[in-house]
Amino acid sequence: MDHKRAPLNRFLWVLGTIVVVLYALVPVAWLVSLSLKPADELSNGKFLPRSPTLDNYTGAKGVFNDPQFPSALRNSVGIALIATVLAVTLAMFAAYAIVRLDFPGKQFVLGGALAIAMFPPVSIIGPLFNMWRSLRLFDTWPGLIIPYMTFTLPLAIWTLSAFFREIPWDLDKAARVDGATPFQAFRRIIAPLAAPGVFTSAILVFIFAWNDFLFATSLTSTNRARTVPAAIAFFTGSSQFDFPAGQIAAGSVVVTIPIILMVLVFQRRIVAGLTSGAVKG
Amino acid sequence: MTTTAPPQAASDLARRPRARDAGTRAHISDRARAERRLGWMLCAPAVAVMLLVTAYPIVYAIWLSLQKYDLRFPADRRFIGLRNYGAVLSNSIFWQDLYATLVITVLSVAVELLLGFALAYVMHRAIFGRGLVRASLLVPYGIITVVAAFAWRFAFDPTTGFVNGLLNTDTSWFTKPWSAFTVIITTEVWKTTPFMSLLLLAGFTLVPDDLVRAARVDGATGWKRLTKVIIPLMKPAILVALLFRTLDAFRIFDSVYVQTRGAQNTETMSILGYNTLISRLNLGLGSAVSVIIFGLVILIAFLFVKGFGADLSQQRGER
């Protein structure tokens, strides 16, 4: 069947592949090229810069000398990492219980997670805004970590449950027969086997937290906790008419590089994670 | 839930003869009770967090939505029943925003489905560079939405952009509703089609090759094989992907905020909620908007599950 494709057919497939790659990468290449343009080339309407420069990165008005961007970068990395660790830890416990243990209320946990996956975040920004002001969580790291952790728990619970189902549980049973308590079996036998799934869900959770804009703009107001997406959206030029396209592009490139590295290195895991909840179960 | 690895395991335990300790009924039920307690303990933190950060605030939002409560005039706070809902629903801006949100949702999800299907097919059948295709598709998935929105905004912008040069026009895209919608939908489609195509790719793997080959032997054309064999088998995967993408598109916020801030009638429901709550600090009225959005999301999910029979137990990861 497939191995005797006609040359024309083959050519069309190659073409299709090239189109897909271009589709995905042209906007990114455009940002890179925009970020390398000197100020006087910004509005020449050309795709590529004629005399590329790093001014938008390290120049006097570059993102790394901006009053906001470096601290936003720090906030983003810290908040996303902490939220990831917390969400994955809690989800790991829950997923283990769901896959392995028999207890009433399992449906409630799964149903609740599903409901939250569909929950519109904009519905709770008002209450959270008000609650965070009185709890002094407004404009702090925990103020963002808590919602990120919550909204990524469902994703983490599904992904982990799917991975946990693939684990050879006989080992766990053997350990239990040998006298290990369920908790010991979890810690000594299952946790190491589950590491790849844990890692995959951590990547997905991190991408979510790194991406969020709505909570970041609603629940922060200063450099203390403002993350990169909010900082980029609020970049302002020296005057209303001087829109800092070059700096925005440079900031965008800086925060896109880690994501691109991550998808290149972990593409198999990410795909497995994204599709595991969907059909495999 | 259809099967049940865990109960099976439990009954295994119950049935297993134990040499060491013959009359073990009490022991077994102790063990079952311990298992049950451990299950609750392990789920408790996750459940507590989810309830505290979503269920409690939504109840609080309902409570706020029944009050006149403007943070700029906090002394004026009082209970006013359903009047905030009356004010929102009788305002033409609300209906305009609902319309804009539906336009963006329906058009982008429709394009994403077609394009996502094509991409999934390319990935499924690609002879070379499958890894390359997959890795490049993950770039739009992983990129920050705000960044994607800026990339497309700059691309379409008449002064910085290259799109006008490419299309040989001088359209100023962000000054008219339909062209502004085009840019927003393009951004949304570019960013989220890869996710859709990965879900659909997983659906493709559900279609047994033998069945497609048998249909071909029976003389079914490519189109017939697609519509009569492949799509029906993939229907569950398609519906779940559609449901999730529809709900996701319905709460669109980032790209509209970055590209138009709601100008040219592109304001969406989420932008309306954000503006009322955070920019105008009107917690009462804003909460009414929030609760309405919440209700609409439930309605959409209900329509998918009851109307199209989307089977979410699959998505829940149960077998």
Image (tube, grey):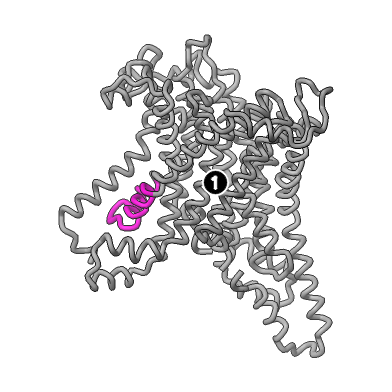
- Residue B164 included in the magenta stretch of the image: no
> What is the magenta range?
B114-135
* Residue B6 percent location from the top left of the image: 66, 73
* Residue nearest the viewer, comparing B85 with B172: B85
Residue A54 visible to an observer of this rendering = yes
- Residue A17 picture location, percent across and down: 29, 47
Dot 1 corresponds to which residue? B247
Within 10 Å of the Cα at label 1, are there few (<14), some (14-19), or many (20+) other Cα atoms?
many
Give the main secondary structure of the magenta stretch: helix
Which residue occupies the foreground of this view, B77 or A246? Answer: B77
Question: Who's the residue at 33% across and 65% down the image?
Answer: B228
Single out the residue that lies furthest toward the left.
A7
Q: Quadrant of residue B179?
A: top left
Give the side of residue A277 with respect to residue B51, left or right.
left
Closer to the camera in the image, B289 or A276: B289
| Quarter of the view holding residue B7 | bottom right
Residue kind at label 1, given as amino acid type: Leu
Instruction: Return the x and y of residue B137 as percentages of the image width and height.
Output: 40, 45
